[in-house]
Amino acid sequence: MTRADFKAFSNLMQALAECYGKTLSAQGIALRFQLLASHDIADVRRAAMSIPSTRKYTSMPTPADFLELLNGGLPEDLAEVEAGKVLEAVSEHGAYASVVFDNAVTQAVIVRAYRGWPQLCSILGTEESELWFRRNFVKIWQAYSRQNVAVTGHLPGLTELENSRNGFLEALPCPILIGNREKARSLLREADNIPISQILLAAEGDK
């Protein structure tokens, strides 16, 4: 939001407060505006409409309630979704593929908690290991998310690691985009060591 949105935001917050029999001070509205300023006014308006119609609040929703909704939901729900995404990618692509997810926190968990993509793939494959992974991943993902731990770029697979080790730099595979392709490409672009040709190939693979 920009300063031009402040009046619309103020009216929106005052109307929402009335739903709960409350009034907001100018300072309270200004603080909420500052805390939610990174989001578009249209998204904030949709959240303001959704909260009283879908949730049984007994008091005026806090900025944290808005941020939870604007950021996609409860952290534990997001972590469960990401765990499922990882398991699906392991099953579909395996350890030899290089991958880039659409979530930097997910990549951080894979790199820091599981020592990389091939190592993660190697410990999965049975129902018991996948149940253990899901519980462990969800716990770590929430902790990393709270601390803004993130890894951009891509996660090299066995083929890339082997070719790099042997000097076959012209034979490095194009990373596979996992999840939202545009977000995954954005994380790929943030890496310092990815040739532009690989980014272009990843984009072509989306066509």
Image (cartoon, rainbow, N blue to C red):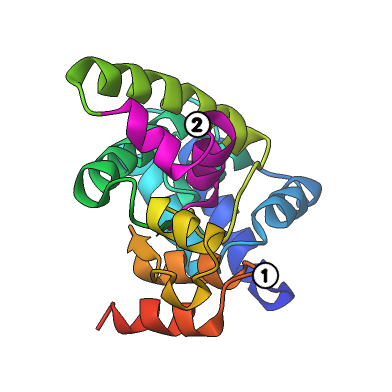
Q: Which mark is residue 192?
A: 1
Instruction: Kindly identify which residue carries mark 2.
Output: 114
Q: CA distance from mark 1 to mark 2?
A: 22 Å
- Percent from the top left, x then y, of residue 40? 55, 68
* Disc 1 crowd, CA 10 A, few/some/many (<14, 14-19, 20+): few
- Residue 149: name its quadrant: top right
Q: In the rendered structure, which amino acid carries the disc numbered 1? A: Asp
At x 65%, y 62%, the residue is: 38
- Percent from the top left, x then y, of residue 124? 29, 28
Residue 110 on the magenta segment:
yes
At x 74%, y 55%, the residue is: 34
Q: Main secondary structure of the magenta part?
A: helix
Residue 134 or residue 110, whichever sits in front: 110
Magenta range is: 101-124
Asked if 98 appears above or below 77 in the picture, the reply is below
At x 68%, y 35%, the residue is: 147
Q: Earlier in the sequence, mark 1 or mark 2?
A: 2
* Element type where label 2 sits in the image: helix
Is residue 113 visible in the rendered image? The answer is yes
Relative to residue 30, is residue 143 drawn left or right? left
Asked if 26 appears above or below 87 in the picture, the reply is below
At x 39%, y 71%, the residue is: 174
Relative to residue 130, is residue 133 drawn left or right? right
Asked if 3 appears above or below 139 in the picture, the reply is below
Residue 64 or residue 186, whichever sits in front: 186
* Disc 2 crowd, CA 10 A, few/some/many (<14, 14-19, 20+): some
Residue 139 on the magenta segment:
no
